[in-house]
Image: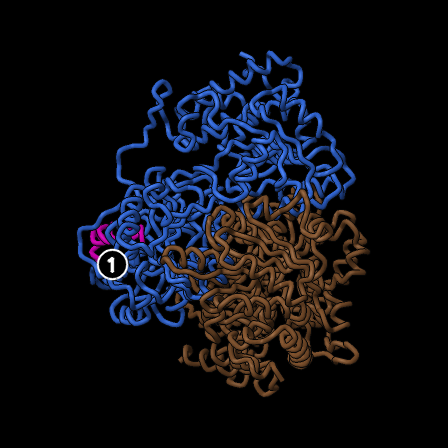
Chain colours: A brown, B blue
Amino acid sequence: MLIEKIKSPADVKKMDMASLATLASEIRTALINKISKCGGHLAPNLGFVEGTIALHYVFDSPKDKIVYDVSHQSYTHKILTGRAEAFVNPDKYWSVTGYTEPCESEHDQFMVGHTSTSVSLALGLATARDIKGELGNVIAVIGDGSLSGGEAFEGLDNAGEYATNFIVVVNDNEMSIAENHGGLYGSLAELRAGQGKSENNYFKSLGFDYLYVEQGNDIESLIAAFKQVKDSTKPVVVHIHTLKGKGYSFAENSKEGFHWAVPFDIPTGVVNWGNGESYGGILGEYLMKKIKADPKVVVIHSAVPAGIGFFADRRKEAGKQFIDVGIAEEHAVALASGLAKGGAKPIYSTHGTFIQRTYDQLSQDLCANNNPATLLITMSGADGMNDTTHLCIFDIPMMSNIPNLVYLCPTCVEEAIAMMDYAIEQTAHPMAIRIPNGVAHRSAKFDTDYSNLNTFKIDKRGRRVALIGLGSYYALAEETAAELAKSGIEATVINPRFATGVDGEMLSELRKDHQVVVTLENGVVDGGFGEKIARFYGNTDMKVLVKGLKKEFYDKVPYDELMVRNRLTPGQIVEDVLAVLG
Amino acid sequence: MLIEKIKSPADVKKMDMASLATLASEIRTALINKISKCGGHLAPNLGFVEGTIALHYVFDSPKDKIVYDVSHQSYTHKILTGRAEAFVNPDKYWSVTGYTEPCESEHDQFMVGHTSTSVSLALGLATARDIKGELGNVIAVIGDGSLSGGEAFEGLDNAGEYATNFIVVVNDNEMSIAENHGGLYGSLAELRAGQGKSENNYFKSLGFDYLYVEQGNDIESLIAAFKQVKDSTKPVVVHIHTLKGKGYSFAENSKEGFHWAVPFDIPTGVVNWGNGESYGGILGEYLMKKIKADPKVVVIHSAVPAGIGFFADRRKEAGKQFIDVGIAEEHAVALASGLAKGGAKPIYSTHGTFIQRTYDQLSQDLCANNNPATLLITMSGADGMNDTTHLCIFDIPMMSNIPNLVYLCPTCVEEAIAMMDYAIEQTAHPMAIRIPNGVAHRSAKFDTDYSNLNTFKIDKRGRRVALIGLGSYYALAEETAAELAKSGIEATVINPRFATGVDGEMLSELRKDHQVVVTLENGVVDGGFGEKIARFYGNTDMKVLVKGLKKEFYDKVPYDELMVRNRLTPGQIVEDVLAVLG
């Protein structure tokens, strides 16, 4: 097999065209085999096999620097830069990450997983090259879907005024994760239809030279185009038309379904999504019901609509009451603020890792105006995605210190629904709801009145020790209480419900017969919920243990290990409580 | 005077063209008079007098809704919507804010002060209108400078695929705050040169219809154009060419100098900037020296280069080592990360309120990659800008809870310089330095080794009470210590230097002979520095008083009042300390 002989890009350069075609075929087979076992970004990688081969054939990495956007299409790049074994030897499948990673290879420039960053990051490399008087090409690879993100625009606009070598490869597969959204995609379609000719050339309007390659999965065409722009002294866009999912019929036919795939059966294309309940399904049903019941309800999503169960059928059914803005989280928050101001009932949902794009929009566009939009922050907590680039553990510090925002943390599905019902109908504040990654149910009754902000609820009254379990860590509070009971301590268990404030009255009352308060939150503790409790009790005798994750970019740490490292198992918490009680 | 008779837009509609021209002239005089006394955004308002008159002549606010970007050009709008007295009667000058403000008038849709938000916010209003089956025009006004912000692009791109009434007025005065930066501005120049015709039409590439008005300060031309697009059923851009500063020769000739002006003398154009030292001057000199000494140093700014003393001459002198990216904070952070990765020494500076745009870029592009860029966060603290839209009090919670970032807080100019010297040369981490608003000097020697992260320094060793004064509140710690001395308490005074961690060893050692630790930070306490100290001492007997601002969007609260309200005067702090000591 050719693929096994590739130790570095130099080996690619030696091949003739026929061998390169064989290599592409072998790579495609390896990708399908590995991803069918391990899961991963299938369709984006299948579409960019030839593009990557041609890049390494023409350019000289790492002297020439290639920066991948999202870097979820970088598997072929890894294969060609000394990491083929991780794709052909099942024992080594987990030896590389799913994104570019500078620790793995000098050919990887940055660790990224969010979209729309490659142009800006690459422009930094190009500028450093120029400042230092060095030579070489800098190439930013970006998908058409990522172009809708504001950061990509800012980068392109700035790059457009440089008189230097800067090559942007736009990998246009006519898709974001779902279909593309935005007026830009109309003009990209015009460019494709006109074989690169159109009066409305977005890239030229930003100052770029422009080259179109219709056969974006043909190695020879790509090599010719890249040779044409190599050593260019001006910024240039090479717009290549590719087929997402190419070479695996099920992925070609279901590009959204196979954008990212869990393990699947190759011959049948059956994906093993599992049968368990998920918040995707629960939210999809709930939001659709809301849409049907009230024409003022508008659900907004930014390019991952499957995350809330809005697959194509449901999107169609929702009509104008469902808006996918594309990858444009900043705009989504501002749009929601405008909708709320205009008297509609907007609900914007995105994963906890992607809401990071919107701090200023949350603060200024939404919260300073105190418009009553609802935000659903999904996949929250450490028990979900664990790539460094996709951690959902920083949202409480980021969001809960913004004035006017009310951040509600449900302990179970039933409470999540009650909180959403409340948030959508109230008009007092912007409300965010922290949707956990895991689905939990509670049979116990609970108070569903959230109008009195920052009122905590005591679910079980004990003494000496109080456990405040925020959202998905309410269950951990209950488990810890059971563990404490073994030491003869009947702990108080509290559901705080709100991450954005403290219930001063209740906390003061606890001082009568409690010595220790333990806060539990599913995220980093720095700047988070527990520290607010510690501050409240600062001038009292109450001892406070703030439990959660230490501030750190955890990289693929298994959840159980994460718990132990942060002393978050019920046994460890009891140990720490007993140590304080003395 | 006509201006005094304008009680609502209806009065504008009754006027003939000659009267409208007279009105424009009166408004211009009123603007110059008021701003020469009170300060404010002079040049942006002078350029949009005719545009605003024409908007209110043609459209029917508030049924038709006008959303202003930044809203620093909304003074004429305020005059025409019942608030003329605030511009002609000096006793009423302070009765309105410098930005749109829904509390003041139903004609004001949003309170904003950051750029690039109007399109998204207005699209929310338009979508709410459509969902509710209502009629009316929605108009977003945006300046050419604001177009470089990613949020504006995201909004335009999304709007471009709507088939509904949505009008964007692009007020093109060929300027941002300083000159424009970005390839887009080349194609805007082509459009102006071609009287609206060009092959590279950015707005059309995003799906908009397009109309050009060369005479953007001519009321009749503007009225004709706005009538043409009124009740449009498609998104349309009206691109108007205006003169920034129009009608005041000193502003026309010094557009950057008069973008925002403190009080000035009308006949001579002499602006009273004051003679005191400012960080603008100090940073400008320092950074220029660095640039000259080391070709790898690159200073990045996003459109307010005067904030660090980089006026036109200095920008020219710095050459390629100074990059103004335009209003594009997200890109600026990613660019800095790329530059650091490429071996340059990037220094990105922006005000504390504008860094809010970059949470995700700080987290993912910069800190997850741990690239050693330097950030200067200027105007920090509550003692500077006090408009709700420009508060610089949220940066500690926003930034200091991101892993890998080191946030240094200097107590004086000398320490700021030492910290910058260190940050620029080290390669271990991304470093941010919190530049205070006010200039302070200290003659005392201090340790300038910052390589041992999170090591605090005891400047004065006392007992019972320790005062930890972060950055610009170190002086408050000293004042409070002097006040405590009157009660016979010799307090310990600590300069923590780092906002991003705690010195566990020192804090533990304090437990020997201290009962109370007071933390002082110039910003909101929620999610901030003091809470980290409270958490650290949570399981001990140490009492902690966390002092700073309560989480709130303060609106033009005078600094002294802010201090009293938050119990931050030395006297109040001593009272609170004594209450805890009992």
Considering every residue shown, the one lying at the far bottom of the view is: A91
Residue B444 falls in which quadrant of the image? bottom left
Q: Nearer the viewer, residue B549 or A202?
A: A202
Q: Where residue A471 appears, x then y in whole percent?
A: 60, 67
Residue drawn at (41%, 33%), measured in percent from left and top?
B256
Residue drawn at (48%, 37%), measured in percent from left and top?
B176
Q: How many marks?
A: 1
Residue B485 falls in which quadrant of the image? bottom left
For mark 1, give the secondary structure. Answer: strand
Residue type of the residue flagged with mark 1: Val
Q: Main secondary structure of the magenta part?
A: helix
Quadrant where the image shows the N terminus of chain A: bottom right
Magenta-highlighted residues: B471-492
Q: Is residue B304 rendered to the left or right of residue B140? A: left
Q: Is residue B61 above or below residue B345?
A: above
Which residue is tagged 1?
B493
Q: Nearer the viewer, residue B75 or A266?
A: A266
Instruction: Specify whether residue A282 is painted magenta.
Output: no
Q: Where residue B218 appears, x then y in whole percent?
A: 58, 20
Can residue A509 be seen here? Answer: no
Quadrant where the image shows the C terminus of chain A: bottom left
Q: Is residue A209 above or below residue B97?
A: below
Q: Is residue A423 rendered to the left or right of residue B31? A: right
Label 1 crowd bin: few (<14), some (14–19), many (20+), radius 10 Å? many
Q: Where residue A395 appears, x then y in whole percent?
A: 54, 62
